Image (cartoon, helix red, strand yellow):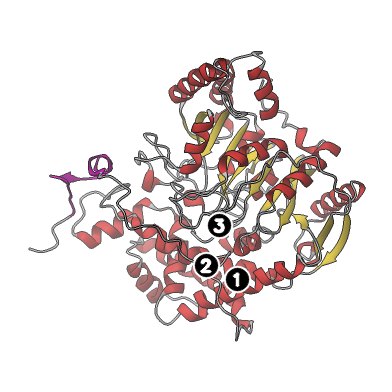
Amino acid sequence: MSFDRTDVERTAHLARLSINESDIENTTETLTHILQLVDQMQAVDTSGITPLAHPLEAVQRLRADQVTESDQRDAFQQIAPATENGLYLVPKVID
Amino acid sequence: MHNKTIVELSRALAAGEFSSTELTTHFLQRIHSLDEQYNSFITVTEERALADATEADERIAQGKATALTGIPLAHKDIFCTQGIRTSAGSKMLDNFIAPYESTVTANFNAAGCVMLGKTNMDEFAMGSSNENSFYGPVSNPWDTKAIAGGSSGGSAAAVAARLTPAATGTDTGGSIRQPASHCGITGLKPTYGRVSRWGMIAYASSLDQAGPMARTAEDVALLLQAMAGMDPKDSTSVDRPVEDYSATLNESLQGLRVGLPAEFFAEGLDSDVEQCVSNAVSELEKLGATVKQISLPNSNLSVPSYYVIAPAEASSNLSRFDGARFGYRCDQPQDLEDLYKRSRGEGFGAEVKRRILVGTYALSAGYYDAYYIQAQKIRRLIKNDFINAFNDVDVIVGPTAPTPAFNLGEKADDPVAMYLSDIYTLSTNLAGLPGMSIPAGQVSGRPVGLQIIGNYFSEAKLLNIAHRFQQATDWHLKAPTDIGA
């Protein structure tokens, strides 16, 4: 499987990742090599095998639906790039 | 003082031979005078260390000390430490002052340990050479031209250079064991779920596991004792009693069944490394072990399977870095999409971006089954290989890495070659098993590690084997020559 420029641009958009124009060629080539390595998997017959998502096959532990965390908004917003009146500021989305 | 193990330091502190403040000052001085050549620390927390030491000295005086009270430690910069920068080796988090404390560091704080600082690492723990750090590569104290290994390269180098008696690490595909091997120290990756992941910046959540790095198995046992245990804050932490890891260190190895997987001794293994491993296996036989050839037939698939699963989980975990709430934000974003894309594009380094792209691709519509599901099916085949093997043997032994530490820059431009250097460690993470690396020889002055892999929750057994091996050999006592008197 090879990766082309369009794949890189499409995937980078899905990941919301800007890539410098000058890096696209190199990225395409490297990702092609990685996918060739990964494609060794395609030769393996895995029919009937159940995918393994958790090494110990544990199920989600549940707890009582009670509030355990107190409000720490001020502490958390101290490290935010921009806030105002307790809100995170980002560029205007709707005019 | 810096050549003493934690066990020795603990006795000396209790006997009043020196105080934790003196000990801490000594290590801080070593860091200041020597670390420029290794770059093993990202942040040195001098004030905090001295305050911790004062508190520890009071605790010792009051007779309330634990075995770890007053012992200086360094933490991989992936563990959130409240009020202290926690960078994960990334420009993205260069300005991130953690607003809360990880369970692992909180446990060490509670035991009375002294925090010397935060160690260098591959960005977001993605790497095998510590060359992917925003803060620059780490040099190997045994040979500064060589890599220290990764991703816990700063922790391994700092322990090897005696800048700290021990350090914490994390291991997603070998990131404790491989740098431990390359730096000639002892490192343990516990069973998945044995140590809490709360407050540990996530790379690949179904593979990440924290563990201790020190010079001896005896010290690693003490450290693991403080780290391990059920944590309600981590839903994947396992509710199971923690054994006394120091209690069984001296048990006999008579009758221990050791398996040597043929696949770990095949093409690609450096012949000198193979010789070191084979000498170590003979040593285990002298200690009473019986050796059996085994097979882990799917282990060659661990590299492709891992490099789908880990990037897929990483692409999801790292989506939280959006430039909006914390971490790096690009200058003058034009709109929200520009804010996301440029903050991430500028804040992440090359390898992190590669893995996000691979992961995003593997999870995208049309490729999910062929990549992600197929990788998870192979993950089961790899786990089943181990389960079958453990029907016949108690532990599996082999090399930690296929070669001794390679030179800085040697593989930096070839991610695939870099990925293949993890070939013997990845399968343990995919299966969730515990694994150790212990010093077992040297090739041209560069250390070689022996890997010991055990069944689930067999950490005590691994430590027992490692300790007995270290009682019979002296590889773990060797120190690099250029690390100051």
> Which mark is drawn over residue B413?
3
Q: Is residue A88 magenta?
A: yes
Q: Which residue is mark 1?
A: B379
Q: Is residue B203 left or right of residue B400?
A: left
Q: How far apart are the two marked residues, 3 and 1, measured between alpha carbons?
A: 28 Å
The amino acid marked with disc number 1 is Arg
Cα separation between marks 3 and 2: 22 Å
Q: What residue occupies the far front of the structure in this picture?
A: A64
Residue A88 drawn above or below residue B293: above
Q: Secondary structure at mark 1?
A: helix
Q: Quadrant of residue B397?
A: bottom right
Residue B70 belongs to the span the image colors magenta: no
Magenta-drawn segment? A72-90
**Secondary structure state at the residue bearing disc 2:** helix
Q: Residue furthest right?
A: B286
User: Badge 2 is on which residue?
Assistant: B309
Rendered image quadrant of residue A17: bottom left
Q: Are marks 3 and 1 in contact (CB under 8 Å)?
A: no
* Pointer 3 chain: B
Q: Position of residue B425 (x, y in %)?
A: 66, 58
Nearer to the camera, A31 or B248: B248
- Residue at position x 50%, y 57% in the image: B236
> Is residue A26 visible to us here?
no
- Sequence-wise, the earlier of marks 3 and 1 is 1
C-alpha distance separating marks 1 and 2? 9 Å
